[in-house]
Image: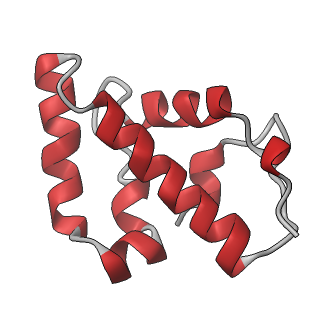
């Protein structure tokens, strides 16, 4: 069973910030199986670009996508798994 304390919100926020790091975005969100299957992954780079351009325009949406992708991985794909605090949560997405 999934432990909600496994992935604190602060850790997910840090993962979202890394997705937006200076330089080319890592693109992990668009690679998420859940996002590829249920959403429009081709729109994720545009959302990242909007956030990089405006600084605040897509923060909430990106955090929601990170949460969705991580929860999909931890609840649906690999129940009971829990990344350590030393791991980058984005590495668990794709």
Of all residues, the one furthest to the top in this rendering is 55
Residue 28, placed above or below residue 52: below
Left or right: 71 as drawn, with respect to 3:
left
Residue 10 in picture, x, y percent from top left: 64, 26
Left or right: 56 as drawn, with respect to 67:
left
- What residue do we see at 11% from left, 23% from top? 53
Left or right: 16 as drawn, with respect to 85:
left
- What residue do we see at 31% from left, 29% from top? 59
Left or right: 72 as drawn, with respect to 18:
right
Instruction: Give the image quarter of residue 87.
Output: top right
Residue 26 in picture, x, y percent from top left: 39, 46
Count of numbered circles in the view: 0
- What residue do we see at 45% from left, 68% from top? 32
- What residue do we see at 79% from left, 49% from top? 4
Image colouring? secondary structure
Residue 1 in picture, x, y percent from top left: 88, 70
Residue 9, placed above or below residue 1: above
Q: Nearer the viewer, residue 26 or 44?
A: 44
Instruction: Give the image quarter of residue 74.
Output: bottom right
Residue 75 in picture, x, y percent from top left: 71, 70
Instruction: Give the image quarter of residue 9.
Output: top right
């Amino acid at each position: 069973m999934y432990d909600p304390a496994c992935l604190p919100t602060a850790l997910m926020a840090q993962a979202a910030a890394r997705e937006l790091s200076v330089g080319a975005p890592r693109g992990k969100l668009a690679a998420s199986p859940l996002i590829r299957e249920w959403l429009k992954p081709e729109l994720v780079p545009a959302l990242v670009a909007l956030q990089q351009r405006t600084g605040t325009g897509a923060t909430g949406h990106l955090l929601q996508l990170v949460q969705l992708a991580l929860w999909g991985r931890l609840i649906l794909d690999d129940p009971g798994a829990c990344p350590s605090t030393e791991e980058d949560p984005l590495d668990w997405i794709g």
